[in-house]
Image (spheres, grey):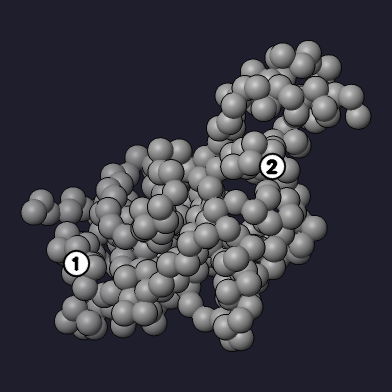
Amino acid sequence: MTDPAPGILSIVATPIGDPDDLSPRALDRLQRADLIAAEDTRIARTLLKHWGVEDARLVSYYDHNEQMRTPGLVARMVAGERIALVSDAGTPLINDPGYRVVAAAIEAGLEIETVAGPCAAIAALTVSGLPCDRFLFCGYAPRASSQRRALLDQLATVDASLIFYEGPHRIIDLLNDMAEVLGDRLAALARNLTKHDQRVARGPVSEIAAALAEEGRIRGEMTLVVDRPRLEASGETSPAVDRAIRLLLAEGLPARRVRDLVCEIFDGKRRDIYQRVLELDRE
């Protein structure tokens, strides 16, 4: 294992559930760091204690103080200190703080290394049973339903699996909005990944929402993976396909060109799509 260079920023991925998922190299970097910049120092200390690291120096680095903290961290690295950056769980910067210090370190000409490891978005995708060849990480959807629906409308024609993080108090609202805006797509809801009570619910978004509603009090850290747009098994087009067709027709494109473009985005028979293009063009 190579020694970390002086004045280096180590972006260290930490476990998303099971503390034993911390890699040997990640533990080495945390032990050798002159300072650990942690999203929550209490969570970081709990992990370090699990691994017998009692004397680490930590400083908080989270959304509301990262702009203020960044110059000091860069100054420490310029002076030769080794800084390790960790989030509460998973890979830093993925819907977590860190972008500012990484950008500032690059500007200062400092060395940066990634200590790869867990990421909830990727872990959920791999167990979802949905296509993994193309995916888009969407983070947390907006809290307000109108803004959430506007985002989903923008994502409706994206030819990729969609990955969201969401809290237990808003997950049903998100699923219901998806059913209406995206159509009743297949999805996988992963909860408490790598923990002893890990669960993955798979099926149409409406069925997952209904099952959650029966639970009463919903708990767990959640990652939702949603399938890309497809034609319905019956040959009928989904709301996302119809939306794409209407937008292209509104641009004045001929029906055959609309068919070709929609076929590039959605799985389905050219004949079925062309028939739907003609139907919507007559409206």
Disc 2 is placed on an element classified as loop
Looking at marks 2 and 1 on the same chain, the residue that comes earlier in the sequence is marked by 1
Q: Kindly give the residue lying farthest to the right in the view shown.
A: 283
* Type of amino acid under label 1: Leu
Q: Nearer the viewer, residue 91 or 34?
A: 91
**Residue sitting at x 61%, y 86%:** 216
Which numbered circle lies on residue 238?
Answer: 2
**Residue sitting at x 53%, y 48%:** 227
Number of residues whose C-alpha sits closer than 10 Å to that of mark 2, classed few (under 14), some (14–19) or many (20 or more)? some
Q: Position of residue 231 (x, y in %)?
A: 62, 38
The relative height of residue 192 versus residue 160 in the rendered view (above or below) is below
The relative height of residue 47 versus residue 237 in the rendered view (above or below) is below
**Residue sitting at x 10%, y 51%:** 2
Q: Position of residue 190 (x, y in %)?
A: 45, 66
Quadrant where the C terminus sits is top right
Please say if the residues under marks 2 and 1 sit with CB atoms less than 8 Å apart: no
* Type of amino acid under label 2: Ser
The relative height of residue 225 versus residue 243 in the rendered view (above or below) is below
Q: Nearer the viewer, residue 49 or 222?
A: 222
Q: Is residue 274 visible?
A: yes
Q: Is residue 66 visible?
A: no
Number of residues whose C-alpha sits closer than 10 Å to that of mark 1, classed few (under 14), some (14–19) or many (20 or more)? some
Q: State which mark lies toward you, 2 or 1.
A: 2
Q: Kindly give the residue lying farthest to the bottom in the view shown.
A: 217
**Residue sitting at x 37%, y 74%:** 198
Which numbered circle lies on residue 27?
Answer: 1
The relative height of residue 176 versus residue 277 in the rendered view (above or below) is below
